Image: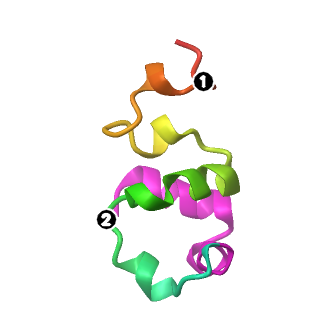
């Protein structure tokens, strides 16, 4: 698990809380090494973390309308 995912989990209230909000099992989240691409927008909405923070490889900061670059 990377640092960004760990931070997102804390912001969401933990693995179990995030799993409930995403309607998936906590075990599924335990298997993630990083935020899955298909979950980025949902996790952005839940945590308030920007998509470029969650997955900068997919959403570079200049693509994020909330980015102050």
Rendered residue at 45%/76% (across/down): 29
* 39 w.r.t. 61: above or below: below
Who is closer to the viewer here, 46 or 38?
38
- Looking at the image, the residue that sits furthest to the top is 69
Q: Is 5 part of what is drawn in magenta? A: yes
Q: Quadrant location of the N terminus? A: bottom left
Q: Give the range drawn in magenta.
A: 1-21
Rendered residue at 47%/35% (across/down): 52
Identify the residue under disc 1: 65
* 8 w.r.t. 33: above or below: above
Identify the residue under disc 2: 33
Residue 34, numbered circle: none
Q: Quick one: label 2 or label 1, which is nearer the N terminus?
A: 2
Who is closer to the viewer here, 37 or 33?
37
Who is closer to the viewer here, 23 or 26?
23
Residue 30 placement (x, y as % from top left): 40, 79
Quarter-of-image position of residue 58: top left
- For label 1, the SS is loop
Main SS of the magenta part reads: helix
- For label 2, the SS is loop
Residue 42 placement (x, y as % from top left): 60, 58
Left-right relation of 62 to 48: left
* 55 w.r.t. 34: above or below: above
């Amino acid at each position: 698990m990377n640092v960004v995912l760990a931070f997102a989990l804390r912001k969401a209230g933990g693995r179990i809380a995030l799993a409930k909000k995403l309607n998936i099992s906590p075990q599924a989240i335990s298997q993630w090494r990083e935020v899955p691409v298909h979950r980025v927008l949902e996790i952005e909405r839940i945590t308030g973390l920007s998509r470029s923070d969650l997955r900068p490889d997919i959403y570079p900061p200049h693509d994020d309308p909330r980015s102050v670059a």
